[in-house]
Image (tube, rainbow, N blue to C red):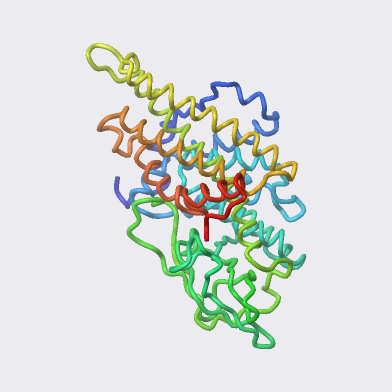
């Protein structure tokens, strides 16, 4: 693999190698509508033709494949659950989940790019923005003409976002923004950032910061072992003048960013399942072909144990997100229900990636198979947008009524 390889060369060399077949042990496809299956199939085919042939190359280089942005917009991956009147997909939450599952089946970093765009940038503009902001930004974000990022986490405030120190001051005809955010997906190339900061009254509000505003910079984070095909960076605000019309007018307090995170966490619960399904499918195919002691290793009890446990956990996770999708569409899903699905599905995906790697032996650490890349990616997914332990405490507080955070 050489950096000099062009996209066309990678496509020509690797197209057709992705033989993924989604496992569906309980016939869960029967629960999906024909439209949902058609959208999924279109996305799956596009991913096989356009992302699978290049993803290993970009992950090894630790570069984001910018040329994929237009296609992601065309398959409806950006804000599919938002209304069509703003150029978005107008789809239900189950369809949104299915799309995130297909993307992360290929790579968590690509799904992260789409999740941030749809749930953390477009969603708050739609939910909390003015009509002028919706019309100005959403259509271009839906196509990928504009790309966005979400600024909440700070160097000293991760799981406690209420402790943020980024602040804005009212200067009469504009706001003056100072502070910094880190671990921000899409930051290095984002055209806009939805930034959460404390105002003069100490209340948290959202502001839309545009690239090119003086004092706004987005240094890239290098040296990652995880999400290598996703661009991560910081947001630095040094006396940034933000027009007053860029304030999100319809929310204040942590309710704003946490509502966005619920939407993103929902997408992650489907996405992580996709990574698990890819690892299982790869491990099963390998086990049927790889021979030791005169027969395929799929015939040995320990390998069957691993595969049987994998498909059991995948099936349980499929049922979990399908039901959660129904609750989301009905407007009944609670934050703790979303936390349960995010936490469970990322955990089972990590375990399946590790077990799948063991089935492949030494081959499992190579880029010829996806296990090691999924495993490394999922180590980020298990931490971001609510750590594994924080989601446990969210659920614990809901079922006991006792707050263990303080």
At horizontal 44% and vertical 69% (from top left) the residue drawn is 156
Count of numbered circles in the view: 0
Depth order, front residue of 86/364: 364
Q: Residue 238 vs residue 1: left or right?
A: right
**In the picture, which quadrant includes the N terminus?**
top left
At horizontal 33% and vertical 33% (from top left) the residue drawn is 357
Residue 212 in percent (x, y) is at: 54, 75
**Quadrant housing residue 56:** top left
Depth order, front residue of 377/64: 377
Residue 228 in percent (x, y) is at: 39, 52
**Quadrant housing residue 31:** top right
Q: Is residue 54 visible in the rendered structure shown here?
A: yes
* In the image, residue 125 above or below residue 34: below
Depth order, front residue of 95/35: 95
Residue at the extreme left: 293
Residue 252 in percent (x, y) is at: 68, 68
Q: Residue 336 vs residue 91: left or right?
A: left
* In the image, residue 168 above or below residue 188: below
Q: Is residue 207 visible in the rendered structure shown here?
A: no
* In the image, residue 220 above or below residue 334: below
Depth order, front residue of 290/203: 203
Q: Residue 357 vs residue 24: left or right?
A: left
């Amino acid at each position: 693999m050489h950096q000099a390889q062009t996209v066309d060369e990678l496509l020509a060399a690797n197209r057709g190698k992705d033989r993924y077949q989604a496992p569906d042990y309980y016939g869960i496809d029967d629960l999906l509508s024909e439209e949902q299956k058609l959208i999924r199939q279109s996305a799956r085919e596009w991913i096989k033709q356009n992302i699978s042939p290049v993803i290993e190359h970009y992950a090894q280089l630790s570069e984001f494949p910018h040329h994929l942005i237009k296609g992601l917009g065309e398959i409806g991956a950006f804000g599919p659950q938002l209304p069509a009147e703003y150029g978005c997909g107008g789809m239900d939450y189950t369809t949104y989940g299915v799309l995130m599952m297909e993307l992360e089946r290929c790579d968590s970093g690509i799904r992260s790019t789409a999740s941030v765009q749809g749930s953390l940038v477009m969603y708050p503009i739609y939910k909390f923005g003015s009509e002028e902001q919706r019309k100005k930004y959403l259509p271009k974000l839906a196509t990928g003409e504009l790309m966005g990022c979400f600024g909440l986490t700070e160097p000293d405030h991760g799981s406690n976002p209420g402790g943020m120190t980024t602040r804005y001051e009212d200067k009469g005809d504009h706001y003056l923004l100072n502070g910094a955010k880190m671990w921000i997906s899409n930051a290095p190339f984002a055209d806009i950032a939805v930034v959460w900061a404390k105002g003069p009254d100490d209340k948290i509000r959202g502001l839309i910061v545009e690239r090119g505003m003086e004092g706004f910079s987005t240094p890239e984070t290098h040296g990652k072992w995880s999400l290598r095909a996703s661009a991560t960076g910081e947001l630095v605000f040094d006396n940034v003048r933000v027009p007053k019309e860029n304030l999100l007018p319809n929310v204040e307090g942590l309710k704003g960013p946490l509502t966005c995170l619920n939407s993103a966490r929902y997408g992650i619960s489907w996405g992580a399942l996709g990574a698990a399904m890819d690892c299982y499918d790869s491990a099963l195919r390998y086990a049927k072909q790889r021979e030791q002691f005169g027969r395929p290793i799929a015939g040995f009890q320990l390998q069957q144990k691993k595969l049987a446990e994998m498909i059991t956990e995948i099936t349980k996770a499929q049922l979990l997100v399908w039901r959660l999708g129904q609750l989301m569409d009905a407007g009944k899903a609670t934050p703790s229900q979303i936390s349960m699905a995010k936490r469970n599905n990322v955990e089972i995906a990590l375990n399946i990636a590790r077990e799948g790697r063991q089935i492949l032996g030494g081959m499992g650490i190579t880029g010829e198979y996806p296990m090691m890349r999924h495993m490394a990616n999922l180590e980020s997914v298990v931490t971001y947008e609510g750590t594994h332990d924080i989601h446990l405490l969210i659920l614990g507080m809901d079922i006991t009524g006792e707050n263990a955070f303080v």
